[in-house]
Amino acid sequence: MTYFYDEDYTFTRLSFPHMLSPTNTPPGTGSIQAEVYFSEKYKPLTGTPDDLVEPVIRDLRRCGLIREEDKVLFKKAVKLRYANVIFDLDRAAALKKVHAYLDDLGIAYCGRYGDWGYMWTDESFISGEKAADGALVAHSQAAR
Ligand SMILES: Cc1cc2nc3c(=O)[nH]c(=O)nc-3n(C[C@H](O)[C@H](O)[C@H](O)COP(=O)(O)OP(=O)(O)OC[C@H]3O[C@@H](n4cnc5c(N)ncnc54)[C@H](O)[C@@H]3O)c2cc1C
């Protein structure tokens, strides 16, 4: 997996599913997943996800990840409306307020949207376990 922070590249993150298992793609081929980020507030998506396919392929050629002689056999664009949390300047103060309110009400929160963070799958899992443990402790204390 690799990140592209350059504004002049369409995509921000690339991953290569064929490297995770040889059965992810037919023999002699590879695959590239490109993530193009947008947000209604900061960078709205104009057009359709399909409009991004050719610019992404152009940029993959431009940075050398697809060679001139490579043939693209399959292309597909999917829009995920809710994806990564954006760390804007309002985040820290807003998160403190929302979490304090949920704590007051005794509502447990977890995961990417509960913790409102940049989380990997394993971190989300651990966050869920911690929230469940906290709920069990609170329940057993209330039962005493
Ligand atoms: C583009 C992208 C790429 C990523 N790549 C990787 C990666 O390569 N490796 C990695 O480890 N992690 C990756 N992550 C991070 C990982 O996917 C997330 O951190 C993880 O899935 C978060 O798990 P979660 O359970 O907190 O939230 P989610 O997986 O988002 O699950 C929340 C679930 O709650 C459901 N839900 C929401 N509201 C309600 C409701 N009111 N009632 C009932 N259900 C509801 C949603 O439908 C969803 O199924 C990526 C994330 C994104 C956005």
Image (tube, rainbow, N blue to C red):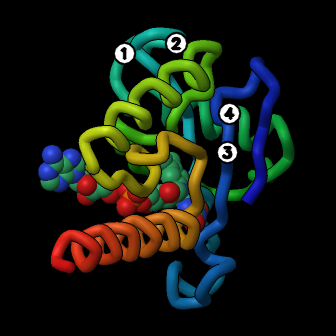
How packed is label 3: few (under 14 Cα within 10 Å), some, or many (20 or more)? some
Please report contact status of discs 2 and 3: CB closer than 8 Å, yes or no. Answer: no
N-term mark: 3 or 4 = 3
Q: Secondary structure at mark 3?
A: strand
Q: Residue at x 65, y 27 (%)?
A: 10
Foreground of the two, 47 or 69: 47
N-term mark: 2 or 3 = 3
Q: Taking 81 as reference, is 46 left or right?
A: right
Kindly report which numbered mark, 4 or 1, lies closer to the viewer in this rendering: 1
Q: Which residue is mark 2?
A: 43
> Percent from the top left, x then y, of residue 40?
40, 14
Q: Residue at x 25, y 79 (%)?
A: 140
Q: Which mark is residue 58?
A: 4
Q: How many marks?
A: 4
Q: Residue at x 67, y 51 (%)?
A: 14
Q: Is mark 3 within 8 Å of ligand 1?
A: yes
Q: Which residue is mark 3?
A: 13
